Image (spheres, rainbow, N blue to C red):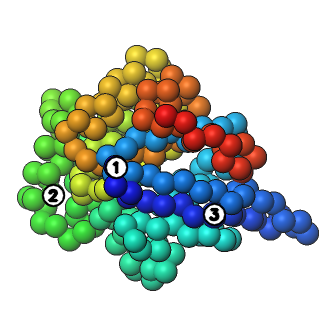
């Protein structure tokens, strides 16, 4: 497999009053192209902080994130914004869909931000919503969708710009078992049809076990990397 992203000696320390709190400690790993990786660990272990650093939403105290031979923290703010829009996708536990817009409009939004025409953006959004099994829900607003359907819309939105990497933070955390399983099946089907890599932060052990590889974080230290 060829490398997509390398996390090199990442540490993160926050200042809390008169003391320093180290959240991540010398974390190193590689994500390959078309690979699905789970990051697991107890609450407070640094999982979400690490995900935010991978997405250039937070900056490490030390270390580098190399994405296809480029250090993302050498980018300007504008370049980082373009990087997130065009090369990354994000999925959160709370889907963060815009309630006043339809599923189609929500998924098309990243394309419009990238200055794509409305017709082209909606055409791409329609294809993705069909791919995630929501062809009959294009004009429904989030309030008219089930939890699993809303998360499928969020995944379609994350994929609409054809990113190389999708970062997902507890994507099944608020779903029942059946809906969570449907999201997993969706990830499997997407892996076979597109070459996007996924990094999934999760407490769901069954979901983690089904992905290609699991990274275990304990008190900010990467203590395991297993297939």
Q: Nearer the viewer, mark 1 or mark 2?
A: 1
Using residue 45 as the reference point, say whether residue 153 is left or right of it: left
How would you rate the neighbour count of disc 2 (Cα within 10 Å): few for under 14, some for 14-19, many for 20 or more? many
In the displayed structure image, the side of residue 97 where residue 204 appears, left or right:
right
Q: Residue at x 91, y 69 (%)?
A: 18
Q: Secondary structure at mark 2?
A: helix
Which disc, if any, is residue 10? 3
Residue 69, which numbered label? none
Numbered disc in front, either 3 or 1 = 1
Residue located farthest toward the right when viewing the structure as drawn: 18
Element class at badge 3? strand
On residue 121, which mark appears?
Answer: 2
Position above or below: 97 against 76: above
Alpha-carbon span between mark 3 and mark 1? 23 Å
Q: In the rendering, at what x and y percent does residue 16 appear?
A: 83, 64
Q: Mark 1 = which residue? A: 1
Estimate the spatial distance between the alpha carbons at disc 3 and disc 2, rounded to whole Å.
36 Å
Left/right of residue 21 with respect to residue 218 in the rendered view: right
Residue, x 45% and y 83% (percent of image)?
A: 76
Residue that protrudes farthest toward the top in the picture? 178
């Amino acid at each position: 497999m060829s490398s997509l992203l390398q996390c090199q000696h990442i540490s993160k320390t926050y200042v809390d009053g008169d003391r320093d709190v180290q959240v991540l400690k010398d974390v190193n790993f590689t994500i390959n192209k078309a690979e699905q990786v789970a990051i697991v660990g107890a609450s407070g272990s640094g999982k979400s902080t690490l995900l935010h650093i991978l997405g250039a939403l937070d900056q490490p105290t030390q270390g580098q994130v190399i994405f296809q031979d480029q250090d993302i923290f050498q980018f300007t703010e504008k370049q980082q914004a373009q990087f997130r829009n065009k090369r990354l996708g994000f999925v959160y536990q709370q889907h963060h869909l815009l309630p006043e817009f339809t599923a189609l409009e929500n998924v098309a939004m990243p394309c419009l931000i990238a200055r794509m025409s409305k017709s082209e953006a909606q055409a791409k959004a329609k294809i993705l919503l069909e791919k995630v099994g929501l062809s009959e829900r294009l004009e429904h607003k989030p309030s008219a969708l089930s939890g699993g359907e809303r998360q499928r819309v969020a995944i379609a939105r994350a994929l609409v710009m054809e990113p190389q990497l999708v970062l997902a933070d507890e994507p099944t955390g608020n779903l029942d078992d059946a809906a969570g399983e449907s999201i997993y099946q969706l990830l499997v089907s997407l892996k076979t049809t597109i070459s996007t890599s996924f990094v999934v932060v999760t407490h769901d052990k069954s979901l983690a076990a089904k992905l290609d590889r699991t990274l275990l974080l304990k008190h900010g230290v990467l203590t395991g990397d297993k297939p």
